[in-house]
Amino acid sequence: MLSYVARRFFGAVPTLFIIVTVAFFLIRVAPGGPFDLERPLEAKVMENLNRIYQLDKPLWHQYLLYLESLLRGDLGPSFYFRDFSVSELFARGLPISIQLGCAALLLALLVGGLLGVIAALRQNRGTDVAVMATATFGITVPNFVVAPLLTLLFAIWLGWLPAGGWGDGALANKILPILTLALPQIAIIARLTRGSMIEMLRANHIRTARANGLPGYVVVGVHALRGALLPVVSYLGPAAAALLTGSVVIETIFGIPGVGRYFVQGALNRDYTLVMGTVIMIALFIIVFNLIVDLLYAVLDPRVRYD
């Protein structure tokens, strides 16, 4: 197992190198620059800024300098937030996004998995139809519609929760963002769990377990559920990366200082280092979570071995 993990990490190095290379050159191909304003700066000021941020050097030289700084663990200074480095911005925003993302993912797993199992056990009945109809509605309605509706209901009409802000991490400020992030994932996980659970309940080993007189909760909760979770686990890799790196829509609507907004702000303002840092962070999350998913496969399915 350890040798497999080591091989995966070593194999991730070329992948990261390709991602960094493609992202570095693509963002510089786009028209405009980090210091292009509606009212152009004076030529001398622009020259000094380009020299300070090493943008006056050839593109290949900038690329080598960026790789060198990455090897030192330095993501570079932000061109837009000029009093901060990219690492400092992530150090401030990433813990907040991780809190929201982890809570939303856990809520989606618990609620979505439970609803999927219930729908599978009541296949083609009223409960199944209601769960699947609700899940389809949850998938199709975007976050930027759900968030204002929840704010209108729970913050303005009922007055139970604050309408926005982080509030130093108070629980009341987290509930609406977490719920908004979790609702689409609940719907997707419920559909995945239902489909795989129906297939597992018809499998031969489940029929054998029932024929041997095992209680229903053991058959469903132990034997069927382990196999039914495999498609859900496969989906959790990219889903977890997306949730933990934050959602720009949710963070903007609720005024949360996470990292999701940095990607859009960096792209709009041609903040090369901020966009690169966001791309690298998302790529690292996807690689790590995909590795965790592969390891979970071996736990859930005894036929899978990484020797």
Image (cartoon, rainbow, N blue to C red):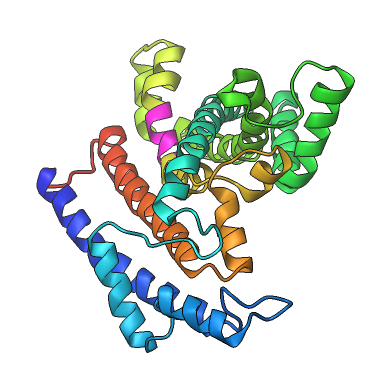
Q: 56 or 125, which is in the foreground?
A: 56
Q: Is residue 173 above or below residue 63?
A: above
Indicate the quadrant where residue 191 lies: top right
| Residue drawn at x 25%, y 39% as measured from the top left | 298
Viewed as shown, does residue 97 lie left or right of 152? left
Is residue 163 rendered magenta in the image? no
Is residue 229 rendered magenta in the image? yes
Indicate the quadrant where residue 178 lies: top right
Q: 293 or 106, which is in the foreground?
A: 106
Q: Percent x, y for residue 205?
A: 34, 30
Overall secondary structure of the magenta section: helix
Q: Percent x, y for residue 256?
A: 63, 38
| Residue drawn at x 42%, y 46% as measured from the top left | 234
Q: 216 or 269, which is in the foreground?
A: 269
Q: Is residue 60 above or below residue 288?
A: below
Residue located farthest toward the right when viewing the structure as drawn:
157
Q: Quadrant of the N terminus?
A: top left
Q: Percent x, y for residue 213?
A: 37, 11
| Residue drawn at x 74%, y 23% as measured from the top left | 162
Q: Percent x, y for residue 110?
A: 52, 24
Task: Report if residue 124 is visible in the image.
Answer: no
| Residue drawn at x 83%, y 17% as measured from the top left | 159
Task: Report if residue 115 is visible in the image.
Answer: yes
Q: In the image, which residues are magenta?
A: 225-232
Q: Is residue 172 above or below residue 215?
A: below
